[in-house]
Image (spheres, helix red, strand yellow):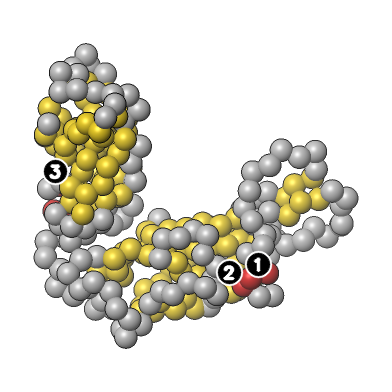
Amino acid sequence: MSCRLLLRVFSCAVFLWWSISAQASIVIDATRLIYSAKEREVSLRLSNQGQKAALVQTWMDDGNPDAKPDDVDVPFVVMPPMARINPDKGQSLRIAYSSSSSVPKDRESVFWLNVLDVPPMPSVQLSNHMQLAFRTRIKLFFRPVDLPGSATESAETLRWSLLKYGTRSVLQVRNDGAFHVSFNSVEVILKDGRSLKVKSQMVAPKTSADFVLEQALSASDVEASVIYEWINDYGSNVRREAKLQF
């Protein structure tokens, strides 16, 4: 079965008066991968916790979730790209970096590993039956040799500002470090004791990111602090408080 054919089985949410097979069985043993340029490859374990065999397709992308496996151009090879995993069994993935490829040497780069879990067809064919596949994407952070600082330093030296763009209020975060910082939550503390949660995801190294607030704020509305939880290399949340600039 080709990569293109497998990708035609999309993960989706629909309202139908049909029988739907919708149960993911493949479990990934990590929420993120850290790839040091000193290593020849990194590995990841997949486990089938379902009661039936599953067909798994794996590939990397550079941030475009709609990119097809045959079309992506990334400096990594995933082995095996496709595997059958029996119930209560596992499969190790090996991800190797192509050193001939060009990535920034002064900062961390991020890519995504895709794992597509295609469940088997039912033993008894049913009318109006829909088969769903489940895709999981996790981040792979590639770290060149001798980067300055650390992921922790990047996360704990972020600079936060409250900006106004017309009628909108924007929380801007500046990352001067060499590592990505992923957020689990970000909150602006208001003077009346409440906190305003901000929709946030990640800020790349040596860049800034803007998070639009759900309501317009001014300096008189907020305390001079922001509380955020960032996700470390082990997938744990680390809570920090930082001063907010106006």
Q: Where is residue 86 in the image (x, y as percent from the top left)?
A: 65, 67
On the image, numbered disc 2 is attached to which residue? 57
Instruction: Name the amino acid, label 2.
Output: Gln
- x, y (%) of residue 228? 24, 38
Residue at (18, 57) in percent of width and height? 206
Residue extending furthest top?
192
Residue 6 - label: 1
Mark 3 and 1 residues: CB-CB less than 8 Å, in contact?
A: no
Question: Quarter-wise, where is residue 29 in the image?
Answer: bottom left
User: Is residue 161 shown above or below 19?
Assistant: above
Residue 227 spot, x, y in % from top left = 21, 33
**Residue flagged by tag 1: what amino acid is it?**
Leu
Q: Label 2: few (<14), some or many (≥20) within 10 Å? A: many
Q: Can residue 105 be seen in this view?
A: yes
Numbered disc in front, either 3 or 2: 3
Q: Can see residue 155?
A: no
Label 2 or label 1, whichever comes before in sequence order: 1
Q: Which residue position is annotated with label 3? A: 159
